[in-house]
Image (cartoon, helix red, strand yellow):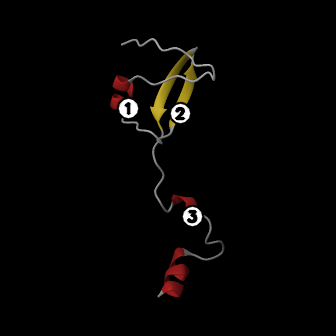
């Protein structure tokens, strides 16, 4: 399938509804663009787990030590 879209003044494009549906993307979701031999492939970027942003913040403590302190 081919879709023709037009670049806006800010060089933005709207992803056609059929493609958004197939990719399962919604407002606020992140997508990544991969350039491959002068073609662009669009992927839905997987969401991070809610606690993923805290990875590495325990510092010198192990998760076992942290759990013991929380108890």
Image quarter (top left, top right, bottom left or bottom right) of the N terminus? top left
Residue denoted by label 2: 32
Q: Position of residue 24 (x, y in %)?
A: 36, 36
In the foreground, 47 or 55: 47
Label located before the other in sequence (3 or 2): 2
Q: Choose top left, top right, bottom left or bottom right for residue 61.
A: bottom right
Picture residue at 34% right of the left edge, 24% below the top: 18
Kindly indicate whether the residue at mark 1 contacts the one at mark 2 (C-beta within 8 angstroms): no
Label located before the other in sequence (2 or 1): 1
Task: Classify 32 as above or below 50.
Answer: above
What's the distance in space between the residues labelled 3 and 2, CA to CA? 23 Å
Q: At numbered mark 3, what does the secondary structure look like: helix, strand or loop?
A: helix
Label located before the other in sequence (1 or 3): 1
Picture residue at 58% right of the left edge, 14% below the top: 38
Picture residue at 48% right of the left edge, 24% below the top: 14
Residue denoted by label 1: 23
Q: Position of residue 16 (x, y in %)?
A: 40, 22
Relative horizontal placement of residue 15, taking residue 22 as reference (left or right)? right
Q: Where is residue 23 in the image (x, y as percent from the top left)?
A: 38, 32
What's the distance in space between the residues labelled 1 and 3, CA to CA? 28 Å
Query: Dot 2: within a 10 Å radius of its alpha carbon, few (fewer than 14), some, or many (20 or more) residues?
Result: few
Residue denoted by label 3: 54
Q: Position of residue 48 (x, y in %)?
A: 48, 52
Task: Classify 53 as above or below 61.
Answer: above
Query: Dot 1: within a 10 Å radius of its alpha carbon, few (fewer than 14), some, or many (20 or more) residues?
Result: some
Q: At numbered mark 2, what does the secondary structure look like: helix, strand or loop?
A: strand
In the foreground, 54 or 19: 19
């Amino acid at each position: 399938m081919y879709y023709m879209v037009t670049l806006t003044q800010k060089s933005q494009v709207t992803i056609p509804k059929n493609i958004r549906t197939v990719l399962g993307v919604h407002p606020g979701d992140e997508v990544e663009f991969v350039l491959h031999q002068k073609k662009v492939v669009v992927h839905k970027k997987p969401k991070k787990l809610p606690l993923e942003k805290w990875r590495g913040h325990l510092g010198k403590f192990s998760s076992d030590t942290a759990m013991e302190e929380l108890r």
